[in-house]
Amino acid sequence: MANQPVMLITGASSGIGAATARAAAEQGYRLVLAARSEAKLSSLAEELGGADQVLTVQCDVQDSDDQKAMVDAALAKFGQIDAVFANAGRGGEPGGFSKADPEVWKDMILTNIYGVGLTLQHCLPALRESKGQLLLTGSAAGRVTIPGSMYSATKWAVSAIGYGVREELRGSGIRVTLIEPGMVDTPFFDEQPEHALKPEDVASAVMYAVSQPAHVDVNEILVRPTPAEK
């Protein structure tokens, strides 16, 4: 069991996080699954091998103590962390910069930017030990200008975090990958998008990045749905 790699995933209870957990389990990973509600993780953990293979952790990524406890619990159970997928995030609401609820902005900024920073800070010592891999959920929205979108602004920030931490870690052996999906059919949206990727499509991109040999660092994967037929 000790030779099985360990992947930690934030925002693991649904959508991209849950799909990646399933894909990683199929590839032999032991898992640390974190979400605001640990209860939502229980059925997924049972599906993926139970307590021997999966650790579930209640973690609000905005809380530094929660994030430290998450890493401490992971190391206490498995002794190592080989890949970290900083995936927790949330969207905004209509209204643009003129009318959106600023409290929604605040929670989104703290989750999508500050929370990612905390995940990096608390997980990097373990990744330095394992010479592991760091993956961040960016977005196609972080590469284009979307009118009135604070969400897009937060994903531009995630891209900047990815670039910056890669330079900080240059020479450490840690690989850094930005996963940048277009629209994905997940609980992120109130209504099912008509034309979107599936969470499993994004999980496949994650697993492609982590499956590369140690000398290959996949910096970014931009994945969008194929345009609809006209």
Image (cartoon, rainbow, N blue to C red):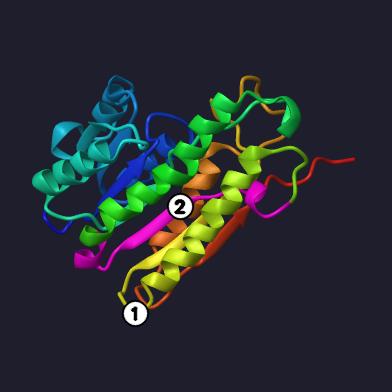
Q: Quadrant of the C terminus?
A: top right
Residue 200 x %, y %: 50, 40
Q: Tell me where residue 167 sits by quadrant.
A: bottom left
The answer to whether 5 appears left or right of 206 in the picture is left
Residue 118 in the figure: left or right of residue 109: left
Sequence-first disc among 2 and 1: 2
The residue pinned by badge 2 equals 136
- Residue at image point 54% right, 60% down: 160
Q: Nearer the viewer, residue 191 or 208?
A: 191
Which residue is drawn at the image coordinates 20% and 36% (left, top)?
A: 55
Please say whether residue 187 is one of the residues in the magenta stretch: no
The x and y percentages for residue 171 are 34, 79
Residue 101, position as x, y percentages in the image: 63, 23
Q: Are marks 2 and 1 in contact (CB under 8 Å)?
A: no
Tell me the kind of residue under disc 2: Leu
Please report the residue visible at 65 percent of the width from the left and 23 percent of the height from the top. 192
Give the secondary structure at mark 2: strand
Magenta segment range? 127-144
Q: Amino acid at mark 1?
A: Gly
Give the residue pinned by disc 1.
171
- Residue at (29% x, 22% y) in the render: 43
Task: Report the front residue among 3 and 75.
Answer: 75
Residue 61 vertical position relative to residue 121 in the rendered view, above or below: above
